[in-house]
Image (cartoon, helix red, strand yellow):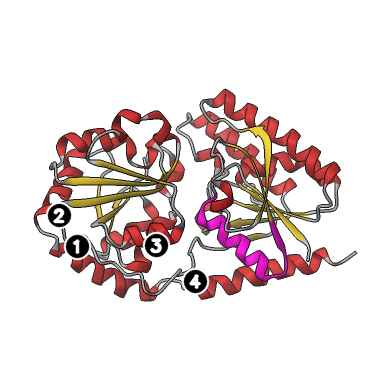
């Protein structure tokens, strides 16, 4: 069995990365995760579903732009030392630009480098147009000349790179396995409204609105936070509010179970950041999987058809008063949420299935596995 080294900057992986590990394993590979130190002590064994892990001594810090760039440079040195001189490497799955760029020196080896592009780096931040243009060019060049293959979750993500496109592009959508058919939306029978924020807990994922939402929404609107992210470390005073329930990191199965018992799931993405307008969050796929109503800000282009079809609620991202009013109205009458749940169940029958995606992904990884056996 040959190793596939999966490089990520997080020691708490998202479920999309774990899905690709499962696809690669079924194709014959042994997945081995490599990641820097992000400060989550003793959690990564639990998070990585029993896969072998190599936790680097290198610290990875995203506190500001300087520490971010410095962390990528340190990661490059650590990976080069480990994979160029200490390990026999034939296949690498590098998650996003931050893990693809450090592999540049590994091109001296005869390896198959696959880039899993969850987010386009050049449009992930609210930079000015000139800087975005330069970063887009640089990102495109890196993928084109370092990566043997690039996996994207949607064609629009490839188009957002501009004129220079990577070689050997594969589209594998972010649709996850149904962990159990027993989990379905039950809702919340209490006289409060439970609103869920899950996944990566960051200001730009709607949490920058939370302080004002607490002021403008009814006191019976309760906010559940599940996951990890910078928001948790940077906002202890908000987390201390009695209307905020922070659950920390949960497995996908645990998150689905919790999602089935809240009233509504939030999928909010600050539209000032370009990539957020083309968000493809797994939390929405999971909402449809168990028919949990969700609310998506209107600026997210990729889900406007769902909003138009009446299977998701929406308000403008920065219209906090309108969002608060929607939540207050749902608190008064939860029957509307039950109707949305039924609509979601019907709508999801026309969506791409996990089995279709799995077949496509395993065929791809098997082709890479076969290439690795050719001398």
Q: Is residue 297 visible?
A: no
Secondary structure beneath disc 3? helix
Residue drawn at x 41%, y 38% is 202
| Horizontal and vertical percent position of residue 235 | 36, 30
How crowded is the residue under tag 4: few (<14 C-alpha within 10 Å), some, or many (20+)?
some
How crowded is the residue under tag 3: few (<14 C-alpha within 10 Å), some, or many (20+)?
many
- Residue 334 sits inside the magenta stretch: no
Instruction: Give the mark, 3 or 2, whose residue is nearer the N terminus.
Output: 3
Looking at the image, which is closer to me, 217 or 241? 241
Q: Which residues are magenta?
A: 13-31
Quarter that holds the C terminus: bottom right
State yes or no: discs 1 and 3 in contact (Cβ < 8 Å): no
Residue at mark 4 to residue at mark 3: CA–CA distance: 11 Å
Label 1 sits on residue:
337
Instruction: Give the mark, 4 or 3, whose residue is nearer the N terminus.
Output: 3
Q: Quadrant of residue 307?
A: bottom left
In-image side of 106 versus 297 (left or right): right
| Horizontal and vertical percent position of residue 19 | 56, 62
Residue 371 sits above or below residue 73 on the image: below
Residue at mark 3 to residue at mark 2: CA–CA distance: 21 Å
Residue at mark 1 to residue at mark 3: CA–CA distance: 16 Å
Residue drawn at x 52%, y 75% is 355
Residue at mark 1 to residue at mark 4: CA–CA distance: 25 Å
Label 3 sits on residue:
286
Instruction: Give the mark, 2 or 1, whose residue is nearer the N terminus.
Output: 2
Label 4 sits on residue:
354
| Horizontal and vertical percent position of residue 162 | 57, 46
State yes or no: discs 2 and 4 in contact (Cβ < 8 Å): no
């Amino acid at each position: 069995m040959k190793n596939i080294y999966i490089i990520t900057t997080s020691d708490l992986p998202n479920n999309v990365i774990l899905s690709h590990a499962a696809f690669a394993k079924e194709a014959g590979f042994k997945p081995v995760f490599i990641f820097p130190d992000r400060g989550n002590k003793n959690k990564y064994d639990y998070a990585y579903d029993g896969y072998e892990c190599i936790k680097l001594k290198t610290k990875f810090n995203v506190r500001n732009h300087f520490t971010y760039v410095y962390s990528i440079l340190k990661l490059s040195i650590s990976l080069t030392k480990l994979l160029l001189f200490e390990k026999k490497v034939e296949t690498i799955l590098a998650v996003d630009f931050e893990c693809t760029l450090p592999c540049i020196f590994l091109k001296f080896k005869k390896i198959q480098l696959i880039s899993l592009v969850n987010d386009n780096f050049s449009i992930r931040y609210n930079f000015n147009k000139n800087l975005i243009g330069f970063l887009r060019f640089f990102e495109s060049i890196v993928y084109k000349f370092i990566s043997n293959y690039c996996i994207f979750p949607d064609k629009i993500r490839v188009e957002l790179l501009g004129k220079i496109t990577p070689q050997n592009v594969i589209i594998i959508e972010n649709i996850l396995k149904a962990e159990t058919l027993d989990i379905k939306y039950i809702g919340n029978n209490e006289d409060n409204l439970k609103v869920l924020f899950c996944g990566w807990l960051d200001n730009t994922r709607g949490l920058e609105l939370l302080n004002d939402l607490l002021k403008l929404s009814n006191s019976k609107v309760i906010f559940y936070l599940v996951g990890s992210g910078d928001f948790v470390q940077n906002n202890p005073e908000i987390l201390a509010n009695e209307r905020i329930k922070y659950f920390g990191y949960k497995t996908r199965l645990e998150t689905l179970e919790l999602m089935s018992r809240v009233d509504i799931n939030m999928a909010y993405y600050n539209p000032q950041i370009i990539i957020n307008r083309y968000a493809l969050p797994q939390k929405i796929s999971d909402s449809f999987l168990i028919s949990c109503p969700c609310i998506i800000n209107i600026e997210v282009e990729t889900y406007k058809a769902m909003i138009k079809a009446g299977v998701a609620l929406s308000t403008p991202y920065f219209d906090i008063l309108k969002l608060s009013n929607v939540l207050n109205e749902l608190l008064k009458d939860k029957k509307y949420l039950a109707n949305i749940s039924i609509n979601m169940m019907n709508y999801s029958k026309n969506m791409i299935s996990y089995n279709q995606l799995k077949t496509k992904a395993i065929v791809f990884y098997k082709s890479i596995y076969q290439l690795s056996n050719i001398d």
